[in-house]
Image: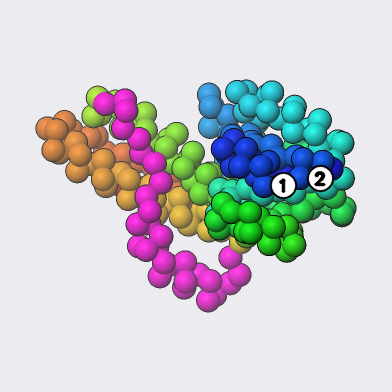
Amino acid sequence: MDLIIVESPTKANTFNKYLKSNEYQVEATIGHVRDLPQKKIGIDLEHGFKPDYVLNEEKKETIEKIKKQAQKASSIILATDADREGEAIAYHIAQILGYIKEDWPQSTLKKQNKLKRIVFHEITKDALEEALKLPRELNFNLIDAQQTRRILDRIVGYKLSPLLWKKIGKRWLSAGRVQTVALRGRRKLKNLHQKSSLGVLDVLRATIQEMMFLRLNSMQKMTRNTNKNLPSIYLMEIIHTPKRLFSKRMLKV
């Protein structure tokens, strides 16, 4: 019997109806099963932004069930969504099942014939059957994109949100990632790329620096609107070295 892993329990139930019960078993992850810890930043700022992933405590039973089913399965088919979040969930399932070798910032899929990845764009029997005929490997470009986005969210939000709460007095506000930074920093990254080959860590450093300045400017405007003074803020300069994220020299914003 083959094990198919999807994200949604509703999708799992639907696919179980489409497929022969003696050939396939469909299980759902119910979203992410492995992520950054909730009570700490979970990013090693001293060693290349290495994420400290942990298993989702609320998904322990789900994870154990998938692991037991995977041991008995002839093939494990990762059928999570086709976007980068879905690819990341498939990646973390593969890691939990022992098919991924992690050596940050690079991860590789171990040589084996049991693990497969399929994608589809509609919840129909025909779409599922067609996808099963065209399995592929994990897309590490999508996985890297999701991990980069997740790390940026955590660093910017974890460092700036407490300052925002203190000065605005609204703890529900979040200083998260800014989408427009991709547009504003596009020329800078393009110029860098023309001069050298950029890796994930280079893009992270350049983007974090740009995001910090954008968020602080936004926070300054908010404090002016609420008649509260935001003191001069100093940020450590982000430098491009593999061992340190920040230098000792301070930049005044």
Q: Mark 2, residues whose alpha carbon is within 10 Å: few (<14), some, or many (≥20)?
A: few
Residue 146's spot in the image, x, y percent? 56, 50
Classify residue 210 as left or right of residue 148: left
Whether label 1 touches label 2, CB < 8 Å: yes
Q: Is residue 204 a member of the stretch shown in magenta?
A: no
Coloring applied to the structure: rainbow
Q: Would you name the residue on which mark 2 appears?
A: 23
Q: Residue at x 72, y 47 (%)?
A: 19
Q: Mark 1, residues whose alpha carbon is within 10 Å: few (<14), some, or many (≥20)?
A: some
Residue range corresponding to the magenta coloring: 170-198
Judged from the image, the secondary structure of the residue bearing numbered disc 1 is loop
- Judge by depth and name the residue closer to the eye, 239 or 83: 83
Residue 219 appears in the picture as rendered: yes
Q: Is residue 196 a member of the stretch shown in magenta?
A: yes
Residue 215's spot in the image, x, y percent? 32, 45
Residue 155's spot in the image, x, y percent? 48, 40
Amino acid, disc 1: Leu
- Judge by depth and name the residue closer to the eye, 126 or 4: 126
Residue 240's spot in the image, x, y percent? 55, 56
For residue 32, what is the image quadrant?
top right
Q: Residue at x 67, y 47 (%)?
A: 18
Amino acid, disc 2: Glu
Q: Would you name the residue on which mark 1 appears?
A: 19
How many badges with numbers are in the image?
2
Classify residue 245 as left or right of residue 116: left
- Judge by depth and name the residue closer to the eye, 164 or 244: 164
For residue 26, what is the image quadrant?
top right
Q: Residue at x 51, y 53 (%)?
A: 205
Separation of marks 1 and 2 at Cα, in angstroms: 8 Å
Q: Residue at x 30, y 44 (%)?
A: 216
